[in-house]
Amino acid sequence: MNRRRTKTAVLGLGAALLVTAGATAATGAAATDSSTSAPSVASASASGEREREAAALTGRAKLYRSAGDDITFSFDAHLAAKDNDDPLKATGTFEWSHYAGGDGAWAKAEVDCLVTGGKVAVVSGVVTDSDLPGAKGKRVGITVHDTGRQDRLGYSWASTGNPVETKDLPKCVGSAPFEKVKKGTGDFTVVPWNPKF
C-alpha cells in the first residue's frame, strides 16, 4: 500500500472516528459480547437446567455522523456461566469499519476481556485481521451503553489517536460512550454480569 493510501486508511479508521479526545475519558469498565441471534442462555447444568450466560454483548449498528460517514460496529462477545468469576475468560469477536468518500478501513478483534454492569459493557480484544497497516496485534477496548432507544458507544483510541498508535492498553479498558448509534440501524444488547463477591 503506498504512503498516501496508508495515511488515508489511518485517517479513515482512527482519526476520523475522533470527536474530541478531551471529551472522553478512559475507564476501566469491562464489556461482554454476543451475537444478536445468540440466546442469553449459555450452557446446560448437570441437572439438565439451562444456565444464563454470566455476561454478553451482542448486536450490530451504525454510528451517527452528520457528514454521512459509514461507521459500523458489531459484537459477538460472551462470558460463560462457568467462568463467572473471571472476565478474562470471555470469548468471541467484535468488528468495526469506517468509510468516508470511498476511503477507510476495517478491523476484527478477538475478545480477551468482557465486563458488564447493568446496561453498560466494556469489551477488549486484540486485532487479528485488518486492512489498516500496523493494526494487527494491537489491543483495543470499546464501551457500549444499551439504552434501549438510541444506544451509545465509545472506543479506546478516542484518547490515543487511533488503534495503531495505542500502546500497552490493559484488558477491559474503553472510553466513555460518547458516540450515538444511528436510529434505525440496529441495536446492541448487554447481558449484565452478576459477580459473586
Image (cartoon, helix red, strand yellow):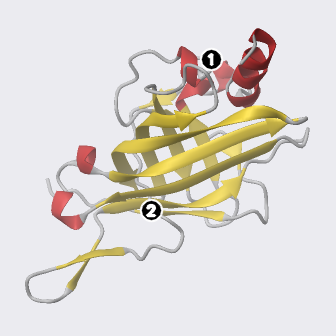
Q: Secondary structure at mark 2?
A: loop
Image location (x, y in percent) of residue 98 = 73, 38
193 relative to 63, above or below:
below
* Residue furthest front in the image: 1
User: Residue flagged by tag 1: what amino acid is it?
Assistant: Gly
Q: Quadrant of residue 106?
A: top right
Q: Using the image, determine if residue 52 lies above or below residue 190.
A: below
The location of residue 171, given as percent across then percent down, is 34, 33
- Measured as percent of width and height from the top left, residue 140 is found at 48, 31
Task: Tell me which residue sits at (56%, 24%) in the image.
Answer: 163
Secondary element type, mark 1: loop
The tag earlier along the polypeptide, 2 or 1, is: 2
Q: How far separated are the C-alphas under marks 2 and 1?
A: 27 Å
Q: Residue at x 54, y 25 (%)?
A: 135
Kind of residue indicated by mark 2? Ser
Query: Which numbered dot is residue 161?
Result: 1
